[in-house]
């Protein structure tokens, strides 16, 4: 369920717990999680970006993505609460399955 605000952001202990369940995602400023995905060429990068976009639309939760020739940095946080929510970690796990 998309977070529209009205709940507190996850605290440091919750973030640590959820981050431990992900594969190579990084925490920045206790507000965002990110991961860099590497690909062999631009076509593979864009295929990944399009799959993430489709997933994000279906989940109603949209990451920021920085796209270059062979990489895509995906960054997640919940704008409505100015921090991380459980949804960020759920979407991160789903992105890893792509």
Image (tube, grey):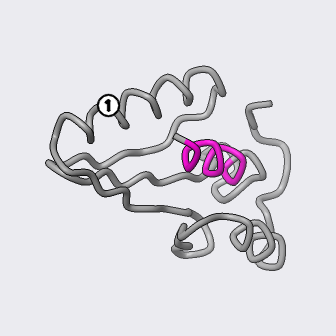
Secondary structure at numbered mark 1: helix
Q: Name the dominant secondary structure of the magenta segment.
A: helix
Q: In the rendering, at what x and y percent does residue 17 appear?
A: 80, 73
Q: Is residue 40 left or right of residue 89?
A: left
Above or below for 64 versus 50? below
Residue at which label 1 appears: 47
Q: How many marks?
A: 1
- In the picture, the quarter occupied by the N terminus is top right
Q: Is residue 72 left or right of residue 90?
A: left
Crowd around label 1: few <14 · some 14–19 · many ≥20 (10 Å):
few
Residue 35 position by quadrant = bottom left
Residue drawn 64% across the image and 26% down it: 60
Q: In this view, does 4 lie to the left or right of 47?
A: right
Q: In the rendering, at what x and y percent does residue 76 appear?
A: 54, 52
Residue drawn 74% across the image and 32% down it: 2
Give the extent of the magenta segment. Answer: 88-97
Q: In the rendering, at what x and y percent does residue 4 appear?
A: 74, 34
Q: In the rendering, at what x and y percent does residue 90 appear?
A: 72, 47
Q: In the rendered structure, does residue 7 fall within the stretch colored magenta?
A: no
């Amino acid at each position: 369920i998309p977070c529209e605000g009205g709940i507190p952001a996850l605290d440091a202990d919750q973030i640590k717990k959820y981050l431990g369940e992900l594969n190579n995602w990084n925490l920045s400023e206790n507000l965002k999680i990110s991961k860099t995905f590497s690909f062999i060429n631009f076509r593979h990068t864009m295929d990944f970006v399009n799959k993430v976009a489709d997933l994000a639309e279906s989940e109603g939760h949209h990451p920021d993505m920085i796209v270059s020739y062979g990489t895509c940095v995906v960054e997640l946080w919940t704008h409505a609460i100015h921090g991380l929510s459980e949804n960020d970690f759920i979407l991160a796990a789903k992105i890893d399955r792509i």
